[in-house]
Image (tube, grey):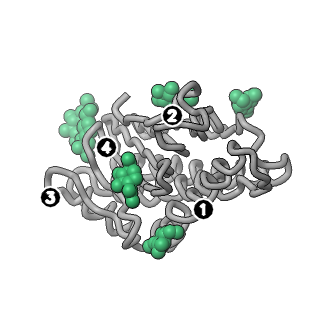
Amino acid sequence: MLCLLLLCGALACGADRAAPLAFTMLQLTRVSDGHSDFWGNATLDGQLSHRLEGLNLSQVLPLEPPAAWARRKEDVATYLDYFANVVKLINMERPINYTQSLCCHLGCRLFPNGTAHSFYEVTLNGTAFLSFHVPTATWQRHWPRQDMVAIFAHRELMKYPQTTYDLQHFLNVSCVDVLRAQTARTAGKQSSRSHTPLVLGLTLGAFSLVGMAVGIFLCTGGRC
Ligand SMILES: *[C@@H]1O[C@H](CO)[C@@H](O)[C@H](O)[C@H]1NC(C)=O
Ligand SMILES: *[C@@H]1O[C@H](CO)[C@@H](O)[C@H](O)[C@H]1NC(C)=O
Ligand SMILES: *[C@@H]1O[C@H](CO)[C@@H](O)[C@H](O)[C@H]1NC(C)=O
Ligand SMILES: *[C@@H]1O[C@H](CO)[C@@H](O)[C@H](O)[C@H]1NC(C)=O
Ligand SMILES: *[C@@H]1O[C@H](CO)[C@@H](O)[C@H](O)[C@H]1NC(C)=O
Ligand SMILES: *[C@@H]1O[C@H](CO)[C@@H](O)[C@H](O)[C@H]1NC(C)=O
């Protein structure tokens, strides 16, 4: 797997952990002949919390009550379906007769000294493509060449609050808050904080994917 997933292994997750407590999401999208395949997972504290297969997102840990979860699941499926349709449409106009692999890796880590670190990294065909700089809510380009594909995808992602300020808030605040609450829980303190913010991240992740789709699949071939 090209995207390195940093997991805090179940055994290393005791109260005296040296490794950070983490929530990470990994999403792989493969587009081939105009057809999109989605696959992904999310882990909280080293445990599988969500799984994505095609448009089917399931929560493995019961983080959200069924009614709320049903809505969230639908939101993510809507964005992914939209992505797949954008790709299909582009493919009809200008056949995409090769495979593109997009990998998104995002989440946050909380270190034992209280420091937190959040990240969102994207690779295209296994090469660093874009990353999100949390303090400034901006996307940064890493693509080795000055291709229009990177320039355009970057511009698309910078356009929407969902892929800039909402994402910044999710990564810097919501995600880290949940980890802090989790730490309090394992330390035996009372906490009833909801996990809803983590699930919100799944929706934002899917939205970002749509932003990238527009850039990547419109621009491949040098025309936008
Ligand atoms: C999530 O997916 C990655 C990539 O395939 C895999 O290495 C990892 O073991 C999975 N995590 C869990 C908890 O299943
Ligand atoms: C979605 O995934 C869940 C859990 O893996 C599975 O039980 C369910 O049958 C799947 N639904 C569809 C429509 O594939
Ligand atoms: C893929 O598309 C390009 C550009 O349209 C074309 O030159 C090439 O021959 C096509 N390859 C295949 C295998 O169809
Ligand atoms: C990704 O790799 C495929 C070949 O596997 C290539 O046709 C495609 O152009 C690559 N995408 C980019 C943006 O370079
Ligand atoms: C906390 O720990 C992390 C990881 O070991 C380190 O990178 C960071 O600089 C530390 N922060 C402080 C304020 O000591
Ligand atoms: C991120 O969160 C930290 C700690 O909660 C806060 O001090 C900082 O101002 C936040 N930064 C942004 C850009 O939201």
Foreground pick, 11 / 22: 11
State the residue position of label 3: 146
How far across and how far down the image is residue 12, in percent?
53, 29
Distance between mark 2 and mark 3 Cα atoms: 37 Å
The residue positioned 56% from the left and 65% from the top of the image is 173
Q: CA distance from mark 1 to mark 3?
A: 34 Å
Q: Which residue is mark 2?
A: 8
Disc 4 + disc 3, Cβ < 8 Å: no
Image height of 166 relative to 7, above or below? below
The amino acid type found where label 3 is placed reads Gln
Question: Reading the chain from its start, which is encountered first: label 2 or label 3?
Answer: 2
Disc 4 target residue: 124
User: Residue 195: x, y in percent?
Assistant: 71, 53
Mark nearer the viewer, 2 or 4: 2
Residue at figure coordinates x 51%, y 34% from the top left: 8
Q: Is residue 82 left or right of residue 144?
A: right
Of pointers 2 and 1, the one earlier in the residue sequence: 2
Q: Amino acid at mark 2?
A: Cys
Which residue does the numbered mark 1 point to in the structure image? 174
In this rendering, the label closer to the viewer, 1 or 3: 1
> Mark 2 Cα within 10 Å, few/some/many (few <14, many 20+)?
many
